């Protein structure tokens, strides 16, 4: 009888394996920097500090959007799930939480329908940068 019992669970096991395989493929496709060995901090600083005004999001290549997303992940500003973490900057006073938080929320709302991870993070960050550059 033990053989029959294990055969009953075979379809369930196959289903679980199938679901896990799909999950791993999705998580790999969402990771903008799966083979990242680190970030050149000088290049990262140059990219983030020399942000152009009035960026046309459709003209920016996805590879650049993903590289900027990797920079933001490297500095622990954005998680791999897309959450924005600025608490350490708020706590040290580098960023004024009361001035920036509403802008982040507006930018997040504006690009909430963007399905591509790199494009969404880049668009939110660009929106925030444009808000900051405008003031």
Image: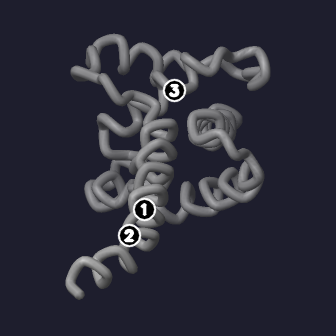
Of the two numbered discs 1 and 3 on the same chain, state the one appearing first in sequence.
1
Q: Up-down: is 123 above or below 24?
A: above
Q: Which residue is mark 1?
A: 14
Quadrant where the N terminus lies?
bottom left
Q: Is residue 135 visible?
A: no
Which residue occupies the extreme bottom position in the image?
1
Here the colouring is one colour
Q: CA distance from mark 1 to mark 3?
A: 34 Å
Q: Which residue is mark 2?
A: 10
Q: Position of residue 77 (x, y in %)?
A: 38, 46
Asked if labels 3 and 1 touch by Cβ distance under 8 angstroms, the answer is no
Asked if labels 3 and 2 touch by Cβ distance under 8 angstroms, the answer is no
Q: Nearer the viewer, residue 73 or 62?
A: 62
Q: CA distance from mark 1 to mark 2?
A: 6 Å
Q: Secondary structure at mark 2?
A: helix
Of the two numbered discs 2 and 3 on the same chain, state the one appearing first in sequence.
2
Q: Is residue 30 visible?
A: yes
Q: Which residue is mark 3?
A: 66
The residue drawn where x is 37% and y is 68% is 13
Q: CA distance from mark 2 to mark 3?
A: 40 Å
The residue drawn where x is 63% and y is 62% is 102
Quarter-wise, where is residue 45 in the image?
A: top left
């Amino acid at each position: 009888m033990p053989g029959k019992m294990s055969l009953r669970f075979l379809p369930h096991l196959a289903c679980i394996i199938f679901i896990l395989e799909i999950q791993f493929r999705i998580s790999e496709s969402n990771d903008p920097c799966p083979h990242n060995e680190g970030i050149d901090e000088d290049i990262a600083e140059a990219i983030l500090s020399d942000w152009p005004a009035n960026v046309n999001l459709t003209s920016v290549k996805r590879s650049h959007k993903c590289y900027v997303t990797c920079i933001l992940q490297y500095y622990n500003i954005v998680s791999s799930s897309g959450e924005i973490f600025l608490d350490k900057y708020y706590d040290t006073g580098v960023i004024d939480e009361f001035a920036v938080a509403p802008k982040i929320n507006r930018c997040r709302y504006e690009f909430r329908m963007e399905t591509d991870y790199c494009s969404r993070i880049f668009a939110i960050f660009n929106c925030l940068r444009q808000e900051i550059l405008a003031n």
